[in-house]
């Protein structure tokens, strides 16, 4: 069946089939047990639970058959699922609706009865069916009623599985989101801790720098005080030297030359010392003319 041949309703139905088929496992024991119950209720060799897909009929639960998938056009359920009521063929070998069917020929199917699998929102997924190798005049109302009840059981089973799967998917998604948020919180916490440690390190460095600055300031103050003391000592030494120079100057060059009869004494000096210490000792003699 090509994509162009599928109408809108069939696309919706196939989407529903795809949604439910993911909760069905291979050799599903629950669905196989339902197929066995169908065969026992009808006292027939074959019982099946079938999903009708786009190109095939998938027997998700079987009793008495070794096949699990056939072409859609070869199955009896593909046409039966169009309705809502039980569908029955008393003699498939002579009934024109089934006589040319390959599955009927290969398995010698004589009698066929099915009830469509209809979801609670109205999608026709497939059918539950009983098949016999001999033809039958009819099936009893109780048999058809049990078949209809088993169709509901299959739908409820699939609905329960799908709900559980969706709940698990939602839980996994929420857990993934929660774990991602928790990882983000942990990352933020770790970043905050790193920032705090960096701040503590910066504070310690600032404190260390402050201590060093205080030591440098104290050293500068000490150097300044020592320089002040050295200057004061130098000034005292300078004053002392000045006092010595003054005393020496007074010794070398008295403020008044001595008066010697018959002699006029004159002295002139050019100081050679920056301390203005000048003069020398001279002897004065009277000379004969």
Image (cartoon, rainbow, N blue to C red):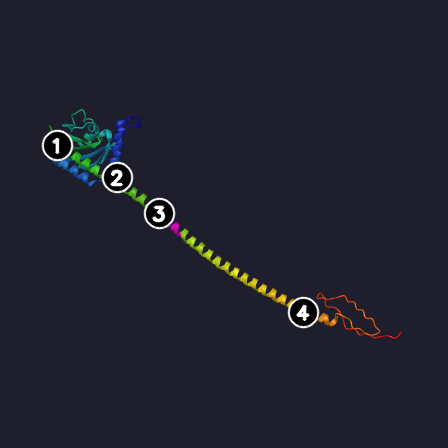
**Dot 1 lies on which element?**
helix
- Give the label, 2 or 3, closer to the camera: 3
Residue 3 shown left or right of residue 245 in the figure: left
N-terminal-most mark, 4 or 1 = 1
Cα separation between marks 3 and 4: 85 Å
Cα separation between marks 2 and 4: 112 Å
What residue would you read off at disc 3? Answer: 185
**Dot 4 lies on which element?**
helix
What residue would you read off at disc 1? Answer: 145
Q: Nearer the viewer, residue 245 or 139?
A: 245
N-terminal-most mark, 1 or 3 = 1
Based on the picture, tell me whether residue 282 belongs to the magenta stretch: no
Quadrant hosting residue 246: bottom right
What residue would you read off at disc 4? Answer: 243
Farthest residue toward the right? 289
Instruction: Give the class, few, some or many, for how many residues have Cα within 10 Å of label 3's Cα (few <14, many ≥20).
Output: few
N-terminal-most mark, 2 or 4 = 2
**Dot 3 lies on which element?**
helix
N-terminal-most mark, 1 or 2 = 1
Q: Position of residue 96 (x, y in %)?
A: 18, 24
Above or below, comparing residue 158 to residue 278 in the picture: above
Instruction: Give the class, few, some or many, for how many residues have Cα within 10 Å of label 2's Cα (few <14, many ≥20).
Output: few
Start and end of the magenta stretch?
A: 184-193
What residue would you read off at disc 2? Answer: 166
Q: Nearer the viewer, residue 213 or 97?
A: 213
Q: Nearer the viewer, residue 286 or 277?
A: 286
Instruction: Give the class, few, some or many, for how many residues have Cα within 10 Å of label 1's Cα (few <14, many ≥20).
Output: few
Q: Position of residue 15 (x, y in %)?
A: 27, 32
Cα separation between marks 4 and 1: 143 Å
């Amino acid at each position: 069946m090509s994509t162009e041949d599928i109408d809108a309703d069939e696309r919706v139905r196939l989407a529903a089939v795809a949604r439910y088929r993911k909760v069905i496992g291979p050799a599903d024991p629950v669905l196989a047990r339902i197929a066995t119950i169908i065969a026992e209720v009808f006292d027939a060799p074959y019982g099946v639970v079938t999903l009708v897909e786009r190109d095939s009929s998938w027997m998700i639960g079987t009793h008495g058959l070794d096949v699990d998938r056939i072409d859609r056009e070869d199955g009896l359920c593909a046409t039966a699922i169009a309705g809502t009521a039980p569908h029955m063929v008393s003699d498939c070998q002579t009934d024109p609706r089934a006589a040319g069917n390959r599955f009927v020929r290969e398995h010698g199917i004589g009698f066929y009865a099915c009830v469509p699998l209809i979801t609670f929102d109205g999608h026709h997924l497939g059918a539950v069916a009983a098949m016999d190798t001999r033809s039958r005049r009819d099936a009893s109302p109780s048999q058809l009623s049990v078949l209809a009840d088993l169709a509901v059981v299959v739908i409820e089973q699939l609905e329960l599985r799908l709900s559980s799967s969706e709940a698990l998917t939602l839980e996994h998604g929420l857990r993934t989101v929660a774990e991602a948020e928790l990882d983000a919180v942990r990352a933020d916490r770790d970043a905050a801790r790193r920032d705090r440690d960096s701040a503590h390190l910066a504070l310690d460095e600032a404190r260390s720098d402050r201590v060093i600055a205080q030591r440098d300031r104290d050293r500068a103050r000490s150097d300044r005080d020592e320089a002040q003391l050295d200057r004061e000592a130098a000034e005292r030494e300078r004053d002392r030297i000045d006092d010595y120079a003054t005393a020496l100057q007074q010794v070398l060059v008295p403020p008044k030359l001595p008066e010697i009869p018959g002699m006029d004494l004159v002295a002139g000096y050019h100081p050679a010392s920056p301390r203005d210490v000048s003069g020398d000792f001279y002897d004065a003699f009277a000379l004969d003319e």
